[in-house]
Image (cartoon, grey):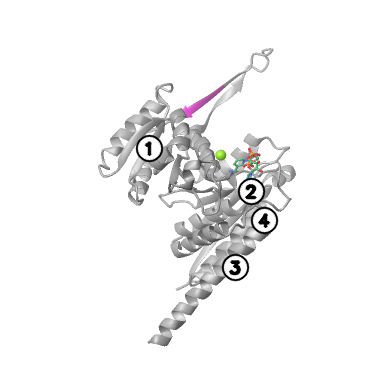
Amino acid sequence: MTKSLSIAVIPADGVGREVVEVGRQVLEEAVAATGGDADLTWTEYPWGSEYYAEHGTMMAADGLERLREHDAIYFGAVGWPGVPDHVSLWGLRLAICQGFDQWANVRPVVFHPGITSPLRKADTTPLDWVVVRENSEGEYAGIGGRNFSARDGGEVAVQSSLFTESGCERIMRFAFDLARTRDRKKVASVTKSNAQQYGMVLWDDVFRRVAADYPDVETESVLVDAMAAKFVLRPEELSVVVASNLNADILSDLGSALAGSLGLASSANLDPDRRFPSMFEPVHGSAPDIAGTGVANPIGAVLSGALMLDHLGLTDAGDAVRAAVDAVTGSGVLTPDLGGTSGTADVTSALLAELRSAGDAATARAGAGTAAR
Ligand code: NAI
Ligand code: MG
């Protein structure tokens, strides 16, 4: 039976628009190559910095209500010179993540064939880990304010972090459940409880309590500064890394840089309770420095699309996308951020060709099976 899936697309700004367009084509091809038993409908929303210039808001007033009708959201990147970054981020991406309680942000760090990592260790050691980011509270709770601007040079700002026991617990259970599905069953918790004696001590307490329910999963608790060093020096010890909103945001950029480029990194903003649509987006931003020049690396967006297919129950198609990406990087079709000379369009054609030939091979195998009977 064909499954009908409705996807909201928000390309937003800069290279976000370029890479999301590639992702759509690649996902359609992947679904076709793996039997075509799903029908994807794409509804594009024109929200972002240009919309802001025209309407004074980053998205329509009933934006969340409209998005809610969809099975998933495919997002590009938001932010453009002329609109303050905190306005664009809070007005769109964070409005959706928090409005839909997408509390788990999953950011795999994957080392692909054919890509030179700045880590020498990656040449000889298989590396692969995933950063699980608490995505609903912590340092990005948006609690605080600015005041006393009339005091000459004496304005003050307060930015508070919010850590709740239930918020910590749900993300940690998510991390442990994910660890159980991986070859190496281990969760590392990223903390800073030496300096942040309230929020991060609660974080540590909850981690210890949740860990007791998962005796089969190895654990460690590492200060965020030491974890930054560990990403570089002993990454082979990592499997699932769970961290607060800010810490995970920083560490996942480090992870993707170690894998070769920010342009490779994918992410899923999940509501694991499935009350709301989840949102899938590359980790990178709108890259105004290269937007419009045809060299944006589409792989981060494409792999985010693969995470979306997994979430929608189309794991064969998700696997086909991941295999196509590895085949294309392995064959040396690389954008300049990876040291290559190919453009976005070259990588796109190579991915589509790879998926088409995988689809043809599958059809031929099915045909041979029929002939043999
Ligand atoms: P950025 O991720 O846009 O760019 C950082 C560097 O990585 C730049 O040199 C850029 O050229 C490169 N890069 C990024 N994506 C690439 C790709 N697909 N292919 C090749 N190279 C790529 O981060 P930046 O410059 O700090 O921020 C630019 C804007 O994006 C700002 O307005 C910022 O607020 C916004 N932003 C939005 C995010 C989101 O929508 N989730 C995340 C991060 C930043
Ligand atoms: Mg970031």
Q: Which residues are magenta?
A: 158-162
Residue under label 2, please give it.
Answer: 339
Discs 4, 3 touching: Cβ within 8 Å? no
Element type where label 4 sits in the image: loop
Kind of residue indicated by mark 4: Ser
Residue under label 1, please give it.
Answer: 188
Magenta region, main secondary structure: strand
Residue under label 4, please give it.
Answer: 342
Q: CA distance from mark 3 to mark 2?
A: 22 Å
Kind of residue indicated by mark 1: Ala
Q: Is residue 134 above or below residue 281?
A: above
Q: Residue at x 65, y 36 (%)?
A: 85
Q: Is 238 contained in the magenta span?
A: no
Element type where label 3 sits in the image: helix
Residue 26: image tag? none
Discs 1, 3 touching: Cβ within 8 Å? no
Earlier-in-chain disc, 1 versus 3: 1
Residue under label 3, please give it.
Answer: 353
